[in-house]
Amino acid sequence: MDDPERELDPPEGEEAVREAVERSRSGAPAVGRVVRDRFSSDEVFQRIVAAADEEITAGNRELFFGGLAAGFAITITFLLYVSLYASTGGDPVLSAMLYPLGFVYIIIGGYQLYTEQTLPPVALTLERLASVPALLRNWGVVLAGNFTGGALGAAALAFGGVLSPEAATAAASIAQKGIDTGWWPLFSKAAFAGLIVAGVVWVEYAARDTISRLVVVYIAFLSIPIGGLFHSVVSFTEMIYLVYLGDLSPVVGMTEFVLPVLLGNTLGGVVLVTAVNYFQTTEERLESARFEGADRQLSVGEWLFGDLVGRSYVPLVDTAERIADDENGPYRVVVPISNPRTETRLVEFACRLASDREDAVVDVVHVVQKPARTYGVGQTQRIVDESESLLADVGGTVGDYDVDWRTSTVITHRSFEEVFGIADRKRADLVVMGWGEDGLWDAARADRPIGELTNQLPCDFLVLKDRDLDPSRVLLPVVDGPNADLNGEVARALRARTGAEVSLLHVVDGPDERDAGERFLADWAAEHGLDDAPRTVYEGGDVEAVIEREAVDHTLLLVGATERGLLSRLVRGSLHYDIVGNVDCSVLLAERPTARSFRERLFGRR
């Protein structure tokens, strides 16, 4: 009989299985390799890069409200600190015992704190995988959220009767000490606080469990009040509290108290920790972070100016050559696809449109959303090789048309958002993409900067809802606008290249507008080379119902975006075009970039 106390050997292959599963979805290590509960500096760096990707590509709304929550949490730190200070007679140790609680909420809860942002996005920026403007946007939005949350929390403390009279006196006294401290001592003390906070972030990504993180966060932030140091968001909350009491001018408080603390925190976080920790990692991590080496890095101009020169963030892998900005270059049609096996009809459709132009080039791009474990170069190359094999079949389809064509593969964290980056890098004139289940739309998230991207389109967009695509009988509802003009170009190209029958439809409010409607439709048709197409004008009624009724006898419906836009509504599932789901034929949705005023950029569309 076997000894029940004997230690059993691990099953064969268990180690390999463990290694396969012990990585996060982002591809960063989830467990250290040499000692199972400890990461090397390279592995910590990889985890920070994965986190930085999430933060640098987050939308303004996501960042701001994460920062707002952190600002509220800092209010808790201020509340508990002054309350214990009053009840313990100002004991420097006892009064600080609950000071770290707000920071525990922030870091364990995943809120956005400005000083915490000094490490992950900077690591990505130092690698030239994100631009300096993208980093500054991240910092600015988070800081605005932190200060807003701190201001609201301070208002609750000042006017809500939350503090006892003794605690209120202690709060004013503690805040006044910061105001009375000189500019350079504030800066120096804040720099050490920034060192501590950014160091906490680095250690946090080296920890495996929540208890370890909790201990590190508590001890580290306990050192700030005990050491007489200053944190920018806490200092802002203290300052604005005095402003509410009428004891301080906000200008004086910002310039003589908050500003030196903010600069000191930033310097301590960026220079003393981020840069030092960055350069103490080995050269091996460069390959894992850059994904195929320095070719994936931003150029110096892109790194310094970001979106002003086209890009602020790069994908993990892009096998295409960079396209020079040439106004006299060919007309470029970009076709992003998620599955080369099932989207050949979409590629054929784009080729039909492109063949109407003498100098057109069709770029078919296979967009691969980054799977687990793509930090390994060998794994990345395997994905690229498989993609190129699939694209070879697509190339055979494109070759049947009289157009120049290219294929490439993009591996990216961002999936749908990357479509806009691809359009920029390839200097696209037109993007033709599919809309349906298991496509690029499926991976889009409304809380990422989709709204900002879709309100500043880099080129024309066509989105095809493919239902056994047959472009032989086309219905084009016409309104006065650039999106209808784009659909007119599509209809003319389909008629020229496939012999499609094009019918025009226009709906007016009533009999009094019929004559004007007929004149408008005739003029529009002549202007767009469709003057011999059948034209129908309907009086009154539900516009969508009219279109749905007319679409019964057609195989393809062309629909333009409304003034509220198209792509952002598709992402959020708020298109409000019932006809798209009700008709049986294929539907092509069109949107053309339009210039927006400053007011529209600031407040959005109506």
Image: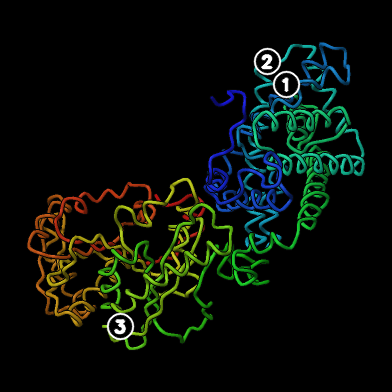
- In front: label 2 or label 3: 3
Task: Name the residue that disc number 2 marks.
Answer: 162
Few, some or many C-alpha atoms within 10 Å of disc 1 (few <14, some 14-19, many ≥20)? Answer: many
Q: Report the residue at 47% width, 45% height from top.
A: 447
Marks 1,2: beta carbons within 8 A = yes
> Residue 538, image x and y in percent?
10, 59
Task: Name the residue that disc number 3 marks.
Answer: 399
- Is tag 1's residue or tag 2's residue first in the polypeptide sequence? 1
Quadrant of the image occupied by residue 180: top right
Q: Which residue type does callout 1 highlight?
A: Leu
Mark 1 vs mark 2, CA separation in Å: 9 Å
505 sits left or right of 164 in the view: left
Residue 204 makes an appearance in the image: yes
> Residue 128, image x and y in percent?
67, 64
> Residue 394, image x and y in percent?
32, 74
Q: Report the residue at 73% width, 42% height from top.
A: 115
Task: Name the residue that disc number 1 marks.
Answer: 79
Q: Which residue type does callout 3 highlight?
A: Gly
Few, some or many C-alpha atoms within 10 Å of disc 3 (few <14, some 14-19, many ≥20)? Answer: few
Q: Which residue type does callout 2 highlight?
A: Val
Q: How is the image coloured?
A: rainbow
Residue 516 makes an appearance in the image: no
195 sits left or right of 21 in the view: right
From what the image shows, is residue 402 above or below residue 153?
A: below
Q: The residue tagged with tag 3: helix, strand or loop? A: loop
In depth, the one of 335 and 473 nearer the eye is 335
Mark 2 vs mark 3, CA separation in Å: 74 Å
- In front: label 1 or label 3: 3
